[in-house]
Image (spheres, grey):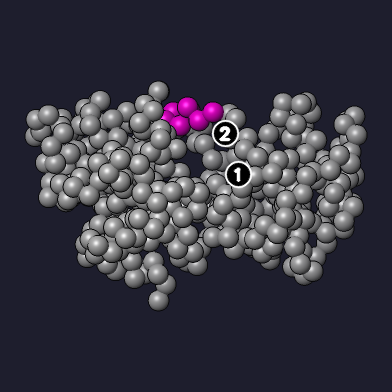
Amino acid sequence: MHPFLRFLSEFKRQKLGVLIDDLSTSRAALVAPAEDISAERINQILSFSGGLTLVALSPDRANAFLLSSMARPSTVINQRTSLPHYISVEAREGITTGISASDRAKTVSILGARTPQPRALVKPGHIFPVATREGGVLVKTDIAEGALDIVRLAEHTDAALYVDLLDNTGELLNADAARTFAAKERLPTITITELIGYRLAHETLVRRAAEAILPTTLAGEVRAIVYRSAMSDVEHVALVKGDVTQGGPVLTRVQAEHTVADVFGGKTPFSRGHLQNSLAAIGERGRGVVLYLRRPFADYKNPNVQHLREEALVAKSASMMREYGVGAQILRDLGISQVELLSSTQRTLEGLSSFGITVVSQIAIPSLVPQSGHTV
């Protein structure tokens, strides 16, 4: 039995569990469904940890509650999670100070209700809703996405209460300490890696939409394979040179779209040069992949995510591969499990093994193409 299935069975029974981020941070959190949560459960969670009471919400649920982004999240919030927060909320009726376990339970239950009632909340308050990416941990490997995936798979609504586990000094518990705590309290434990593994075995984010032979100036003839994302109405392109299913690690460049720089050039960012030199490199070797990812990761129609900075959308290839399971699933679909990553910087590539991708080495993008107007 998959570890997540064992966890899920116990989580459904207790409606409480521990999620460990084993990929990039020393962090673990208590997770519970927001739906119909009781004051007793809130009190239990608060007795375990003095962390902030956070509620991860799907984009649809956040929209239904008419939540707006917190313009300037506090330092305390930022050091607990890297995700954007909405303005804090409180139940409009049936509470006093908003701080007690019963008051918090009332607000959290409203956020997790089967039918969202935006007029049941006032702002600001003592409960902090957290924005998540559609697609969960297959798109963004973070505690908030993981918590939401867990409660959804447990057949609750798309709202997950989570509280970071802290030690006596207020510091985040590491994985070993979190496991010790969970064993002592007899709580089920799961890691983000195990959750990713389960979802990858049962779901897919991309499908092949089209394929054609494409003659290029820099790499010669390549196969252009178009992939459509299951979560957004955009398409990604894999330019494949040679047989990438045989012969060991594959020279790979994963690059985020930056239309103006890619088409017209420029040095900020220098993405056109990276793209051209990467194509030239795989052409010279005779085997490799350039994966060109469109940028569906912010919903430009959704005003709640407009605060995402442009620089964050134009991420380097390594962080793109870690953050977006889309790229990793495309590589898997191409039959690639080992890559030699063409990168403009040396980065720590945590989490790729969870997607079945092993980075054998990182290679600096060579300067093979004079930047004088060459075309792809």
Find out whether residue 120 is within the magenta segment.
no
Look at mark 2 in the image and give the residue it sits on: 312
Q: Give the crowd class for mark 1: few <14, some 14-19, many >=20 residues within 10 Å.
A: some
Location of residue 196 with respect to 30 vertically, above or below: below
Q: Position of residue 272 (x, y in %)?
A: 78, 35
Report the span colored magenta: 303-309
Name the residue: 57% across, 33% down.
Answer: 312
Residue 107 in sight in this render: yes
Q: Split into 4 quadrants, where in the image is the C terminus?
A: top right
Residues under labels 1 and 2: Cα distance? 10 Å
Which label's residue is closer to the chain start, 1 or 2? 2
Q: Are marks 1 and 2 in contact (CB under 8 Å)?
A: no
Q: Position of residue 280 (x, y in %)?
A: 86, 46
**Number of marks present in the image shown:** 2
In the picture as drawn, the residue positioned furthest to the top comes out as 71
Tell me the kind of residue under disc 2: Ala
Name the residue: 47% across, 59% down.
Answer: 193
103 displayed left or right of 155: left
323 displayed left or right of 361: left
Q: Position of residue 257 (x, y in %)?
A: 67, 38
Look at mark 1 in the image and give the residue it sits on: 319
In the picture as drawn, the residue positioned furthest to the front comes out as 169
Location of residue 120 with respect to 350 vertically, above or below: above
Near-viewer residue (48 or 147): 48
Find out whether residue 308 is within the magenta segment.
yes
